[in-house]
Image (spheres, rainbow, N blue to C red):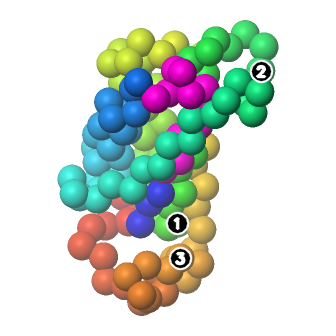
Amino acid sequence: MGQVKVYGLQEALNPIKRQLSDVIHSCVVEALEFPVDKRAHRFFPLEREDFFWPAGRTDAYTIIEIGLIEGRSVAARKRLIRLLFDRISAELGIAQQDIEICISESAAHNWGFRGMHGDEVKLNYRIDV
């Protein structure tokens, strides 16, 4: 199971939401071996007065938070981060300096979906990648 949240300045994020979602999804499918039909992305376009970012970033500054059931290897998570930096920069023109990524993992029993606890659901994909 995975959930993606994307935060950015509304005038920069709104025009690219679909394309950014497609890029993020392609990276998750490749690095974590997610099924192609498994996508849960939410976008949070923020007003300028509601979004503060570090010096040295531009209006394209984008934060990507990915929540996962624990079990992926360090190598798989690092591969995901590298793919995100490279593909977002190449396909959307957002400088890597303007991309911030955080992966958070929690135990399967802390998840609930399909009316069940995460540790009781039989997934159709591997987590131990």
Q: Quadrant of the C terminus?
A: bottom left
Q: Which mark is residue 111?
A: 3
Q: Which element carries disc 1, helix, strand or loop?
A: loop
State the image coordinates of residue 126 (x, y, percent, origin top left).
Answer: 31, 67
- Report how far apart the C-alphas of labels 3 and 2 lie in the structure: 32 Å
Q: Quadrant of the N terminus?
A: bottom left
Q: Taking 67 as reference, is 8 above or below it? A: above
Q: Which element carries disc 2, helix, strand or loop?
A: loop
Residue at image x 52%, y 20%? 12
Q: Check disc 3 and give the amino acid type.
A: Trp
Q: Taking 111 as reference, is 42 above or below it? A: above
Q: Check disc 1 and give the amino acid type.
A: Glu
Do the numbered discs 1 and 2 sit on residues whose CB atoms are within 8 Å? no
Report whether 12 appears left or right of 28.
right
Report whether 98 appears left or right of 91.
right
Q: Check disc 2 and give the amino acid type.
A: Pro
- Report how far apart the C-alphas of labels 1 and 3 lie in the structure: 11 Å
Give the residue pinned by disc 1: 70
Residue segment shown in magenta: 4-14
Q: Quadrant of residue 37?
A: bottom left
Q: Which mark is residue 32?
A: none
Give the residue pinned by disc 2: 54
Q: Is residue 8 magenta?
A: yes
Circle 2 crowding by C-alpha within 10 Å: few under 14, some 14–19, many from 20:
few
Instruction: Using the rendered image of the protein, determine whether residue 117 is visible from the camera's viewpoint.
Output: yes
- Report how far apart the C-alphas of labels 1 and 2 lie in the structure: 30 Å
Specify which label sits upstream in the sequence, 1 or 2.
2
Specify which label sits upstream in the sequence, 1 or 3.
1
Q: Which element carries disc 3, helix, strand or loop?
A: loop
Q: Taking 40 as reference, is 75 above or below it? A: above
